[in-house]
């Protein structure tokens, strides 16, 4: 059994694979101040709810963009799973050519997403990941990582607006309004954030397409991907488990 973990700045996503089948997956908050023992308690509880025997985990692979979590998860794996985890980064995984000025700067999550997306679609791609940051990654038809763009994530941009504009109410942004022209403050905020990000996505995709030789397929992942897909013109598919699949694919070569 394979345990895959993707540690993001806001959320950590974890899944368990039996061969190529994803048995269960979970999303939780990333807690930088936890300990390996506390993480073990959390994981064993999730495994118990999923009726999965944690002792059957034979291998663990992790992508992480939160440095404090590295020591915690390494200690957890060694202490409770009986093995050291494999960490994905530009040096540990050579199967994806990174055509950037400094390959070591490419985040592990972006490497994993690119591997999974090209493995599935076998064509040139633009991959959009709606996380703490919204990342755009360009992959060639030959499976080369060409580079990308990074913008503030939807939720942190919204939080900045609510913090700095004291008279604006805090609103939920998980359902788009029916019109862009809002008739009240809450609707106006929703329209500005949701349709504003739709315009950001479509605009960046258009510019990236113009710089790529072929017409790339545009896919999205991350928690808010379904919401934004419904208000954009450019996103063609949503892949909710893209990162977990990438970790599984990379693990097969270990």
Image (cartoon, grey):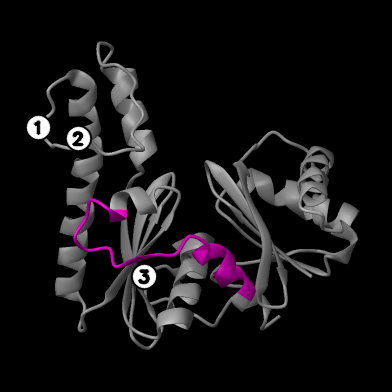
Distance (Cα) linking label 3 and label 2: 37 Å
Which residue is situated farthest in the bottom direction here? 142
Q: 10 Å neighbourhood of mark 1: few (<14), some, or many (≥20)?
A: few
Res 253 visible = yes
Residue 139 falls left or right of residue 18: left
Distance (Cα) linking label 1 and label 3: 43 Å
Residue 50 falls left or right of residue 229: right
Tell which of 113 and 185 is nearer to you.
185
Image disc number at residue 15: none
Please tell me whether mark 3 or mark 2 is closer to you in this view.
2
Q: Where does the magenta region start and end? A: 229-248
Residue 148 to residue 249: above or below = above
Mark 1 highlights which residue? 181
Quadrant of res 30 = top right
**1 or 3: tag closer to the N-terminus:** 3
Please provide percent x and percent y for residue 163: 34, 19
Please provide percent x and percent y for residue 177: 22, 35
Q: Which residue is drawn at 21% across and 78% down?
A: 212
Quadrant of res 123 = bottom left
Please provide percent x and percent y for residue 161: 29, 25
Quadrant of res 165 = top left
Could you tell me which secondary element the residue under label 1 belongs to?
A: loop
Mark 2 highlights which residue? 191
Please provide percent x and percent y for residue 155: 38, 36
Count of numbered marks: 3
Mark 3 highlights which residue? 101
């Amino acid at each position: 059994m394979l345990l895959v973990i993707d540690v993001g700045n806001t959320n950590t996503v974890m899944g368990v694979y039996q061969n190529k089948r994803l048995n269960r997956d979970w999303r939780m908050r990333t807690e930088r101040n936890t300990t390996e023992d506390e993480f073990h308690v959390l994981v064993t509880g999730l495994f118990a709810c999923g009726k999965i025997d944690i002792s059957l985990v034979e291998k663990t692979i992790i992508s992480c963009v939160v440095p404090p979590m590295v020591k915690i998860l390494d200690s957890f794996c060694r202490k409770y799973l009986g093995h050291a985890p494999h960490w994905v980064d530009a040096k540990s995984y050579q199967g994806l050519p990174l055509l950037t000025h400094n390959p070591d700067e490419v985040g592990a999550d972006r490497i994993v997403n690119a591997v999974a997306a090209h493995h599935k679609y076998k064509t040139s791609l633009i991959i959009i990941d709606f996380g703490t940051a919204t990342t755009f990654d360009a992959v060639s038809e030959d499976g080369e990582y060409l580079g990308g763009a990074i913008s503030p994530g939807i939720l942190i941009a919204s939080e900045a607006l609510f913090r700095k504009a004291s008279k604006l109410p805090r609103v939920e942004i998980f359902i788009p309004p029916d019109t862009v022209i809002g008739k009240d403050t809450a609707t106006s905020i929703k329209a500005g954030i949701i349709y504003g990000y739709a315009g950001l996505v479509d605009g960046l995709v258009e510019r990236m397409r113009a710089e790529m030789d072929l017409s790339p397929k545009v896919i999205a992942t991350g928690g808010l991907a379904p919401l934004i897909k419904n208000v954009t013109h450019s996103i063609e598919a949503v892949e909710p488990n893209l990162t977990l699949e990438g970790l599984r694919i990379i693990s097969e070569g270990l």
